[in-house]
Amino acid sequence: MILAGLGADVIKVERIDGGDDARQMGPHLGQWAAVFVPLNRGKRSIAVDVSKPAGRDLILRLAGTCDVFIENFRGGKMNALGLDEATVRAHNPEIIYASLSAFGSRGPDALKPGYEALAQGRSGIISVTGAGPDSPPVRAGVSIVDMSSGMWMAIGVLSALFERQKSGHGQRVDNSLLETGVMLMFNHLLGTQFSGVNPVPQGNSYPSFGPYGAFETADGRMMIGVSNDRMFKRLATALDHPEWISDPRFATNVLRVKNRNELDGELQKLFREKPTAHWTALFDAHNIPVSPIQNAEQVLNDPQVAAIGQMESIALPGYENRSVKVPRLPVSLSRTKPDVLGPPPTLGEHGLEILKEAGYDEAEIAQLVESGICKLP
């Protein structure tokens, strides 16, 4: 999705029998799955049975015309299919061969399958996620490891393409969910080495400074973040509690972290007295970081989200009279604006044009369809 948004022509190779598993991950609007739609905008789809020799040959023929080959099968699968790096590179020596796995390309667990939640567990993310120290393990509510791995893969691919301009050589790009998860845990991993203590779930607070967290208001909840003593002085002044500035429990960030429960209790009593809008306006006026805690519907209607153009409307095939909003790439370039990607492809939607571009004639295409190697719409 990232590469497509930045202008690449992305050919998505799918299974003949149902295609990408994400097509089945609801909720659905007709044939369209909420997971599949945003991640597959702007791609072209071809349905191929890569387990058969003719399917393998088709992929190698396509790879000969491409700059990048990306796969995310479990370890060893590409060798079994005859689509390993050496074989692909024999058809295109300068290609960037990118491999995204669960646990990495080497080591004792390289061949194991894995998913987002497993990576969150293995990397320790689940151990620090939850309502508090006694909370049971909780998976982060969004697929942060999957999404971050995609970003690292895109960064690696772009770096390899840039290096190829200088050297003329292609190279391999590797990433795994485990590596990404471990990277996301960087502060906790260093903190454990410094303190000798394993971190525990902190709920909505942050172990390094305070007050920082979620608080109830008269009509909802909000997050505040105070990261230094200067900001705390502004907070105390805004709340008409100047005595907190010199209070021996709260005078410094170290003390506020140590006495977090007492300070949070004082704040919570105040915040329940008035609605979220009152507090956000007050804190905005005093330059104190604050945000309402919004649900998905509120995010879709957020005026700031609209102002930065974060959502784009697309019409899904079959539902042309009902547009849906999907997030655009969260990056803006002043001269080369990321593409508006449009709708995702139906299964095998672009198969015919992709085959023709690869040099297949009509008789060869008909043979591929008849033999079950390709499925055309």
Image (tube, helix red, strand yellow):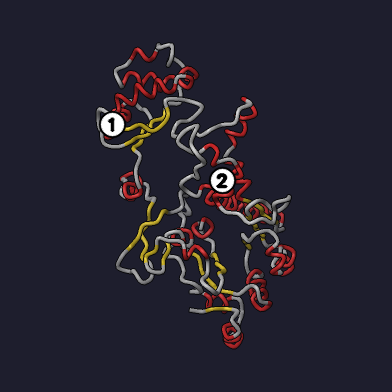
- Residue 292 lies, with reference to residue 3, above or below; the image says above
The picture places residue 338, in percent across and down from the top left corner, at 46, 55
| Callout 1: SS | helix
The picture places residue 92, in percent across and down from the top left corner, at 70, 67
The picture places residue 136, in percent across and down from the top left corner, at 50, 39
Residue 68 appearing in the image: no
Q: Residues within 10 Å of mark 2 (few under 14, many from 20)?
A: many
Query: Could you tell me how many numbered marks the image carries?
Result: 2
- Residue 162 lies, with reference to residue 206, above or below; the image says below
Three-letter amino acid code at disc 2?
A: Gln
Position of residue 94 in the picture relative to residue 254 (left or right): right
Residue at the disc numbered 2 = 120
Dividing the picture into quadrants, the one containing residue 342 is bottom left
Three-letter amino acid code at disc 1?
A: Ala
Residue in view at x 47 percent, y 33 percent: 132
- Residue 292 lies, with reference to residue 322, above or below; the image says above
Residue at the disc numbered 1 = 281
Residue 54 appearing in the image: yes
| Callout 2: SS | helix
Q: Name the mark nearer the viewer: 2 or 1.
A: 2
